[in-house]
Image: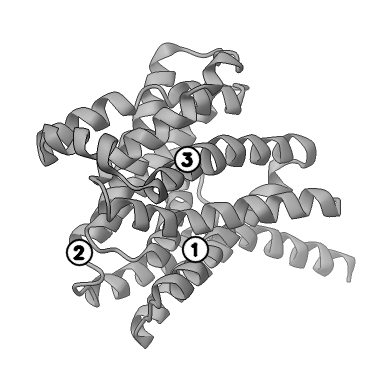
Amino acid sequence: MPLRSLLLALMITFIWGVNFVVIKLSVSEAPPLLVAALRFALAALPAIFFIPRPQMRWQTFLGYGLAVGVMQFGLLYLAIQLGLSAGLASLLMQMQAFFTAMLAAFLWRERLPANQIAGIALAFTGMAVIGLLADHHTSIVGLVLVLVAALGWAISNVLVKSAGKANMLSLVVWSALIPPVPLTLMTGLTSGWASIGHTLTQSSLGFWAAVAFMGYFNTVLGFGVWNWLIQQHGASRVAPLSLLVPVFGMVSSALYFQETFPPLKVLGAVLVFVGLLVHVFGGRIVERWKVQGVEA
């Protein structure tokens, strides 16, 4: 991969990692579901006037918008607002890789390779360790919500695969029109309708800067550049770089919020991350060993 493309990929993973800090700051000022609704509203507007509609079945389009907007980000924002640390959330959201593999195995009878089974086992062991150490900083409710959020991400991955060769930027921008409606309704029902008006009229400039960052930089720019990189260099070269997202997320969260983790919680996080590495790279390493064995 050329240096320019590598730097672009690093920039996007950095933006996506830092975004977890931005989420935590924004949900401290407004209801989390409303923050998610505003993020998607800005991601859609004004981009929909310049980007063509995606060519796919409306059921897939609707399902993608709900899976990403309500399940993935709505519940992620709620989990962070309930006390889950931004750094830990950035790591646990990567459980989507395992959920995607398991959904694919269930829906399309795809066989899970041994390295993926081992990676899943390691990651869920790490999750169990983190869950056993839940405290006022890491609530069980927050952990459950972020896992359901990761499942929403996995469902969106499956829907994208079923859609065929859809233009991902078009899908991201146009599907962003869907989440604001249910997220705003849920905000009114759970936080009160007055909270919506208060957020829109009384929020600080910093809050709106955070929402703009999430809508334009994290969503439109992030997905646009990422999918361009995949088109140019292939998913096999680009996708593994997403493992840097939780690294940037945990480092930026630790630096900004002065987060500290007890040793056993660090062990749990390491198990999840090692599970991700085994899941992504384990098959390639085994194949390389086999080739070297044949050549020898």
* Label 1 crowd bin: few (<14), some (14–19), many (20+), radius 10 Å: many
Query: Can residue 108 be seen from the camera position used here?
Result: no
* Kind of residue at badge 3: Ala
Label 1: which secondary element: helix
The earlier-in-sequence mark between 3 and 2 is: 2
At 20% from the left and 75% from the top, the residue drawn is 135
Tell me if 229 is positioned left or right of 255 in this view: right
Q: Which residue is mark 3?
A: 212
Amino acid carrying mark 2 in the image: Ile
Q: At 56% across and 42% down in the image, what residue appears?
A: 217
Q: Which mark is residue 249?
A: 1
From the image, state whether disc 2 or disc 1 is nearer to you.
1
Question: What residue is at 40 percent from the left and 78 percent from the top?
Answer: 258
Amino acid on which disc 1 is placed? Gly
Spatial separation of the CA atoms under disc 1 and disc 3: 19 Å
From the top left corner, tell me how far across and down residue 273 is, in percent. 50, 68
Q: Is residue 206 above or below residue 56?
A: below
Q: Earlier in the sequence, mark 2 or mark 1?
A: 2
Q: Could you say whether the residue bearing mark 3 is in a helix, strand or loop?
A: helix
Image position of 63 with respect to 201: above or below: above
Q: Which secondary structure lies at badge 2?
A: helix
* Quadrant of residue 211 within the rendered picture: top left
Relative image position of residue 293 (x, y in whole percent): 81, 69
- The label nearer to you, 3 versus 2, is 3
In space, the residues marked 3 and 2 are separated at their CA atoms by 30 Å
Q: Nearer the viewer, residue 142 or 264?
A: 142
Q: Nearer the viewer, mark 1 or mark 3?
A: 3
Residue 140, label in figure: 2
